[in-house]
Amino acid sequence: MDTQYTPLIERFFDGELSPTEVKQYEELLETNEEFQKEVDLFEKAIKLLRLKNISDLKDSVQRIDASRSKSTSTVGWMKIAASIMLLAVVGMGFYSQKFSNDNLYKDAYSPANDYITNMDADLTSIEKALELYNTKQYPEAVGAFTTIELSEPQNQIAKFYLGQSLLQMNQMEQAIKTLDKVSGDYWSEAKWYVALALLKQGKEAEAKKTLLNIMDADEDEAFVLKAERLQNKINSPLRKFVL
């Protein structure tokens, strides 16, 4: 379960904190016991990555046991060793689940918004389609946007929101194909949703390639930053423990 400090700690380990946030992090580390414990748990989970599996962890404990001080009783040391193993495994599970494809998708995804600017009674075909989308009548919106796209193949608004409607209906393959054709002002945003849809499908390599395209094109700073952050999370070593 996340705490109020989890995003700050994750961004610290991803190297994403601003100088002001680094100062805040250091102050919390010195003064806040709850924060200290969560940082310690995170560090233990990362250190665990150096071990290939739980068997290696047991071997490490046995090696430490062989060199322990004679003043430490066997029973006492085994309690300590068991606690270390439990904490490491719990820490691993606590953080690695955050990096599953489903959780990365849920954290990053929010539906595209739009609004109707024409207050007249007579709406244009695209405004009627957007009204259907905004009122979550997605099957009807798909039909409306499809009709527009067939008659106006270069209408990027219709193409983009057709893809959005398909995403809302969980028709991922068709949504990806549609959004991949979007160009112009909506290109970066469309590619962002393509990357998310690919990630949800478990197509990690394709999702990373799409995120890299967004960063390389550098057409929209907001989506470049989003792509960089998601790429960092996908590349996190903790994902090695996601089943």
Image (cartoon, rainbow, N blue to C red):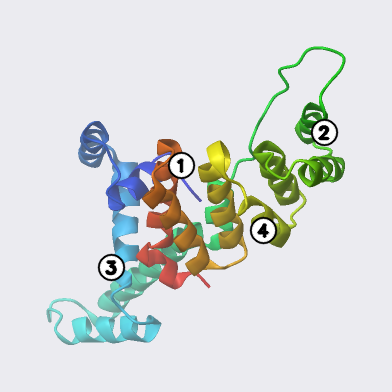
User: Disc 4 designates what residue?
Assistant: 177
On screen, residue 202 above or below 2: below
User: Disc 1 designates what residue?
Assistant: 223
| Residue at x-position 63% and y-position 37% | 112
Distance between the Cα atoms at labels 2 and 3? 51 Å
Amino acid type of the residue tagged 4 in the rendering: Lys
Q: Secondary structure at mark 2?
A: helix
- Within 10 Å of disc 4 (Cα), the crowding (few <14, some 14-19, many 20+) is few
| Residue at x-position 42% and y-position 40% | 219
User: Disc 2 designates what residue?
Assistant: 132
Direction from residue 239 to residue 131 in the image, left or right:
right
Q: Earlier in the sequence, mark 1 or mark 3?
A: 3
Count of numbered badges drawn on the protein: 4
User: Disc 3 designates what residue?
Assistant: 47
Distance between the Cα atoms at labels 1 and 2? 26 Å
On screen, residue 28 above or below 242: above
| Residue at x-position 35% and y-position 64% | 45
The one nearer the camera, 3 or 116, is 116
Distance between the Cα atoms at labels 4 and 2? 22 Å
- Within 10 Å of disc 1 (Cα), the crowding (few <14, some 14-19, many 20+) is some
Q: Earlier in the sequence, mark 3 or mark 4?
A: 3
Q: Secondary structure at mark 3?
A: helix
Name the spot of residue 37 as percent of width and height, x first.
Answer: 32, 50
Name the spot of residue 39 as percent of width and height, x first.
Answer: 30, 51
Q: Are marks 3 and 4 in contact (CB under 8 Å)?
A: no
- Within 10 Å of disc 3 (Cα), the crowding (few <14, some 14-19, many 20+) is few
Amino acid type of the residue tagged 1 in the rendering: Phe
The one nearer the camera, 166 or 79, is 166
